[in-house]
Image (cartoon, grey):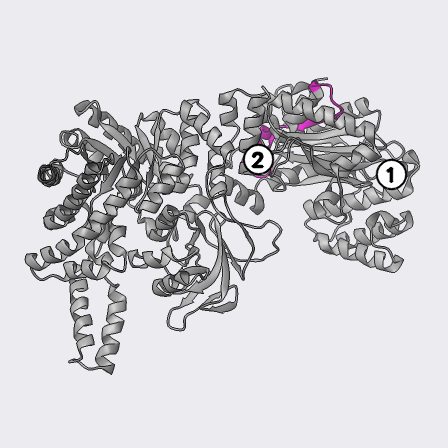
Amino acid sequence: MAVSTKATGKYIYFFEEGNASMRDLLGGKGAGLAEMTAAGLPVPRGFIITTEACLKFFTAGGVFPDGLREQIGTSMRELEARTQKRFGHPENPLLVSVRSGARVSMPGMMDTILNLGLNDRTVEGLAKLTNNERFAWDAYRRFIMMFSSVVLGVEKGEFEELIQERKRDLGITLDPQIDAASWRMLVDRFKAIVSDATGREFPQAVDEQLTLAIRAVFDSWNSKRAIDYRRFNKISDDWGTAVSVVEMVFGNMDENSGTGVAFTRDPNTGEKKIFGEYLRNAQGEDVVAGIRTPEKIADLERTQPDVYRQFLDIADRLERHYREMQDLEFTVERGKLFMLQTRTAKRSAQAAVRVALDMLDEGILDVKGALTRVKSEGLDHLFHARIDPNSAYHVAATGLNASPGAATGQIAFDADTAQAWGSDGRDVILVRVETTPDDVHGMFGSRGILTAKGGATSHAAVVARGMGKPCVAGCDALVIDRRGRTLTIAGKTLAEGDWITVDGTTGDVILGKLDLIDPPSTLPDWLSRFLQMADEHARLEVWANADTPQDARKARELGAVGIGLCRTEHMFMAQDRLPVVREMILADSEAERAQALQTLLPFQRDDFVGILEAMAGYPVTIRLLDPPLHEFLPSLEELLVETTELRLTKGLNAPEFRERERLLKRVQQLHEQNPMLGLRVCRLGIVYPEIYAMQVRAIFEAACALKALGVDARPDIMIPGVGTREEMVATEQAAREIADAVIAENGVPVEYRIGTMIELPRACIVADELAEHAEFFSFGTNDLTQTTFGYSRDDAENSFIPRYLEKKILADDPFQVLDRRGVGALMSEAVTRGRATRPDLKIGICGEHGGEPSSVAFCHSLHLNYVSCSPYRVPIARLAAAQAAIGAID
């Protein structure tokens, strides 16, 4: 029977009216129940209130839409007819569960109420009907506890305390041992708790119970935990939840009854075997609460073999029907099996890949289907250590999950200490207010990085991702005392050397040392096979951002077919060359600067030899010096403090004071009000052409030396931050003149290209002019996002972006997910204009967006040639590129 809606909308569907394709309207749980009903599986009878009703409820300020109350009443009468029971009847009561169900699984994030319809009269009828007084009063106390907690806001712990007290009085340990008289007595005390807490009696009218329960489930869509879950998993706030009203079946009726949760395959490993638990004489919340230890699902084969065989058959049918691993909930009532839910199972990244491959081999999926069954971002977990799930711990604070993986180590407050301790074999967490290029050597020596300031594209985050090290950034709960060398967090003060654990996947900071599970050192065979399948369907190539030979080798091992960004500034920060870099910056004349650069040249040449050799046969895009020179010097604030202290303690004539004062004056000369837009990128190479000249010479001396040894070195030169045709002409001509001169000097042919990094809006608009001289473009979307939005990335993510996301002014953090409407439009313009001038123009992206799946899909739609990302995100980008090509993401 279809529910009549007359002039109002249709807000209710019985299970027979729905199917799996109606997930958006009926929610995942409702669509699953409808599909199982259509397949003839044993499903309790019931109906679904649509997500449309939920959204209209919110639009109206928490008021049911017109017609919904009437449709609920009509549907309950129909359910009574189907079950031959009466809602609220004292002798033959109909009881229902009221369950949430969004279009995607949000386990535990929204509310459920069981045993609804019980009151002081119907509980007596249920006891007589089942000839089981203990069961009836157990069901009633469960309903009061759940309804009071979910709907009335009464703390559930108050009820639990009374249960524990009663068990102590009876000398027992388990809830099933409590007798009927005790449950009856506890129900009276429970109702007194509700009365005291709410100022009203526990609702006895069953229609009121149902109305309040549906309202509470709607409201749970906007609970804090649900909002936080959606934000973390990038689920829209605009979907709403459906509500399933389902005839109750009881797992707590006797020892031949029970409830369970099972997966059709092992969610940790992907092994093809039923994985789950079953709790005898219990209801669903008992499994979740962990009050009793459940049996393994396989134990059912011994105790209830007929039920077990039926369940295995249903599990196999559902998996083949959905062509996907399933997460199943079921109840057994007096030996009869009922299916309560089927949904796509959440699983580890390893399990996801192995299940996809097994289903491919079993003929359940084709190759494209297998590629769509794995979330590309989930692969990130395979390459980083993670906290042992068996560890018990308390999260002291949470920052931004800036670079994935977990690390545990001893706190070091400066880079030198971190490097020294790391060299001694100690596990170190570098803790800073924020990192600078000066800290790179300490980051190399650390297991992980924790900063009080900075965002997901801050220096700490970008460098840590490139190194494959965990990083939690912008943890503003940290109070760091640099002089006292302590930090305070969650009310506790830790000294240097104390242990701390950071989880860069979640942003969690934990006090103390935890056990970790290490990732595999190489790509497992099963993952290699899966990613090779992805490569065969992708059009975009995947390159990597790498600044060292080690990074380049790791990138190649993970499947990168080029280096899209080699940042030369990081090479300058090594301890054996930083003093020479500072000599160059402090030089008073061009001759002194040239002398310092001549000393740096062999260092740079050796750097490039290592990277070009590691990537032999593949292009290596080397970006000439990008940051302002002051970043290689101590901070102005630190120098002011140091010089003041030296002046007061050593005097004006002390050599130490004079040296630091000279350095301070140079830092003050280089100080800019807005260094992001100051003397940096190509502007630096034009004002100090000798710097770029040294770098280009080092690159081609390295390439020629390798070519002479038979190594296929393929350097490309990238000019950063070009915004005008004249800047492109000046820097391209200067670089080409030196490159050709070195090639001629060595008599070794080297193929190369000179291009530019597109990171300014103006560059996008004049891309046709730049392409006259640039042989490739690479979008630097970190800076392009900054200059398009006018946001400072290091400040925005810690100040207003979280608030913007909360208020929905921004749908996503634009430094993590590429802004298609603004930044993307500029990229599209640059592609069109650039290729109008140079049709074979090679175009890629080398910002952090290169490893983010939806951004990769956008790059595919623009017909870019490649995306470049940190080495450990290469597998993510490889899969995302394939999924974009087959239309699985857009």
Task: Locate residue 813, reporting x and y percent.
Answer: 40, 42
Q: Is residue 616 left or right of residue 746?
A: right
| Residue 356 locus on image (x, y percent) | 55, 28
The residue shown at (30%, 28%) is: 865
Q: Amino acid at mark 2?
A: Ala
Q: Answer whether residue 231 is visible to the viewer in this image.
A: no
SS assignment at label 1: loop
Q: Residue at x 22, y 53 (%)?
A: 675
Determine whether, in the image, residue 650 is placed left or right of residue 400: left
Q: Quadrant of residue 139?
A: top right
Q: Earlier in the sequence, mark 2 or mark 1?
A: 1
Placement of 31 over or under 286, stated as above or below: above
Residue 757: name its quadrant.
top left
**Left or right of 489, for residue 699:** left
Q: SS at mark 2? A: helix
- In the image, is residue 716 above or below residue 417? above
Mark 1 closeness class: few <14, some 14–19, many ≥20 residues within 10 Å: some
Q: Quadrant of the C terminus?
A: top left
Q: Closest to the observer: 89 or 235?
A: 235
Q: Label 2 to label 1, Cα distance in Å?
A: 36 Å
Q: What amino acid is at disc 1?
A: Asp
Does the image show residue 305?
yes
Q: Nearer the viewer, residue 529 or 777?
A: 529
Q: Position of residue 287 (x, y in %)?
A: 73, 43
Which image quarter holds the N terminus? top right
Q: Which residue is mark 2?
A: 351
Q: Please name the residue shown 16% across and 64% down the image.
A: 666
Q: Is residue 41 magenta?
A: yes
Q: Which mark is residue 254?
A: 1
Residue extent of the magenta highlight: 38-62
Q: Which mark is residue 555?
A: none
